[in-house]
Image (cartoon, coloured by chain):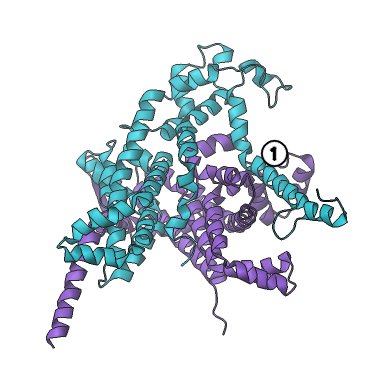
Amino acid sequence: MRRWNYDRIRQVLLGSRSRHGLIPLALLYAVLIALGFVYLYPLLYMAVTSFKSPEDLLNPMVQWVPTQLYLGNYLKAYRVLDYPETLFSTVLVSVVPTLLQVWACALVGYGLARYRFWGKSLLFLLIFATFIIPPQDTVIPQMLTYRRLGLLGNNLALIIPATLGQGFKSAIFILIFYQNFLSLPRALEESARLDGASDFAIFTRIALPGAVPAFIVSIIFSVVWYWNETYLTTIFLEGGVQTLPMQLAKFTQAYENLYPPGVVNIFDRLNEAVKMSGTFLTILPLLVMYFVLQRWFVESIERSGLAGE
Amino acid sequence: MAKTGLQLKFRVREALHGYSFVSLWVIGFVLFTAVPLAQTFLYSLSTVKVAVTGIELTPAGWQNYTRALLTDPTFIQLLVEYAVETAVSVPIVLIFSMIVALFLNVDFRLRGLFRTIFFLPVVITSGPVIRELSAQGVTSVPQVASSPLVQQVVAQLPTLLRAPVQYLLTSFILILWFSGVQILIYLAGLQKADRSIYEAAAVDGASAWESFWKITLPSLSTTTLVNALYTVITLSHFSENKVITYIYSRTYDVEGGIGFASAMAFIYSLVLMLLLLGIYLLLAPRSRD
């Protein structure tokens, strides 16, 4: 056993070339925990408040620990959000355009990465432009067109642009696929071509299998962004399809339809605990998805090529 | 001669195949970006009347623009607030995401957990969720914004400074929540760094502090630019952005709402481009001569 002399204590506390010392490590954890707490404070508050009974809300002694695990808020929020049905249409609104948009972006990314053609830099410029131009600049004519075609309130209003690669934040997905297909070895492509494979066959049989990670990353991000999008969905889908965030946006109104304020007793009036339950129910599916698929989320940015070049 | 002819044929063939892969996007761009953009610009120069059959346009010159810039009492004020708040938020997001990325770049046991935590808001941030949380007053640092001392200091500030400071106090966590993607971009940038440079610097007697300013920061300059542009774009597209909500609220005015909203949308994107340009000029890595 080694003796505890001054040097060894110093090494353990302050660290050495090969390992971290206890003091820097403790500092690191302290700072990260403090930052993490501030960062997650709104979510912690939301989770705690959503379990508070009306009595707990009125009791100034109850701050962080509710006196009981009260589920009444969730029952109300569940009804107000019309949860199963709204959840189902939210999934539909996020997943269908996502699959079509990711497919379109894969095609474009492949074309940009594997072929030389005139106007490529112009195309890149336009792709970046779609990322910068705010939706406010293009949404009104689209809305009027959909109105004329009777497509307002129909999922097609989101599906058609997605199919043509103009879905939500498509520029990022094109970049992800572009980056991914750039690294495909030429030799693989050429040997397939010698075997007489067509360009499209090379894309589907050789390029696509190697792009599975890019597909997974793009799909989950696209689902999340479509899920959380309320500007376009409100304009295009309102009156036909309700998503969870849209329903949350008019939570008060929907609540008062179900529980008219003049009729219900004081404990059933809308309070912040019910609102927080509704907010929590809105993000719950995303939270579950995030914790199941977190590896794909946090490793994704490297694949996008956003981090440099 | 024959050889170059063959080469040319191959080049044309390659280009055609390339076009066939991107053609879908080009059609989509024309239909859903270029044409609507032109139409919106046309609306912005017209008085738009919504009728049962469709819309009627009457040319109105730059009237909608002058109305937005000179007559409307709210728009300019919101636009200035947006520009100031964005200018305040960007450095906060950059500094915060760089600090967190530097910490997460150290190898320690719970690194994955903290990475998960700091990326979480990217997944759950939507307009209505943020609105509910802001309404509860929980998007500010606990105990700070409401403390009497801070309130007093804010009250002493000149009017020009008060609004941005007030914004910082009430929405600090919200600003931090826009750092998720940027943290990962910085992390990726840090992990690309060549370890041997740091070792060489350490041998030459540079402290960690010195190597951060002299090596790490310069090597991240492109990443910082990307992050800054990304931050501005995300903040400007966020559906709770007050300029956006104002434009949206005026769109459905029966008399001339669409034309007015279109003009405001164009002014708004112009300001956004100027912000992006400003950041580019400020942060773009300069060649050394």
Q: Is residue A216 above or below residue A150?
A: below
Chain shown purple: that is: B
Which residue is farthest front?
Answer: A1
A30 shown above or below A177: above
Q: Is B285 or B243 nearer to us in this picture?
A: B285
* Left or right side of B176 for B264: left
Specify whether A30 is left or right of B64.
right
Query: Residue at (70%, 26%) from the top-left corner?
Result: A63
B22 is higher (above) or lower (below) than A278: below
Residue at 65% across / 51% down in the picture? B163
Q: Which of A29 and B127 is in front in this view?
A: A29
Nearest the viewer among B88 and B111 is: B111
Q: Find the residue positioned furthest to the left.
A: B2
Total numbered labels placed on residues in the image: 1
Task: Say which residue appears at 44% left-offset and 17% top-offset.
Answer: A258
Q: Position of residue B178 (x, y in %)?
A: 55, 49
In the figure, what tint was chain A given?
A: cyan
Residue sticking out furthest to the right: A6
Q: Where is residue A277 in the image (x, y as percent from the top left)?
A: 53, 26
The percent coordinates of residue A30 (x first, y second) are 72, 45
The crowding category of the residue bearing disc 1, from other C-alpha atoms within 10 Å (few below 14, some 14 to 19, many at least 20), is: some
Chain of the residue that carries numbered disc 1 in the rendered image? B
- Residue B38 visible? The answer is no
Q: Nearer the viewer, residue B167 or B91?
A: B91
On the question of residue B197 being in view, the answer is yes
What residue is rendered at 62% in x and 71% in y?
B197
Q: What is the three-letter code of the residue carrying label 1? A: Pro
- Residue B105 sits in which quadrant? bottom right
Q: Mark 1 points at which residue?
A: B142
Dot 1 falls on a residue whose secondary structure is loop
Residue A91 position, x and y percent, is: 36, 34
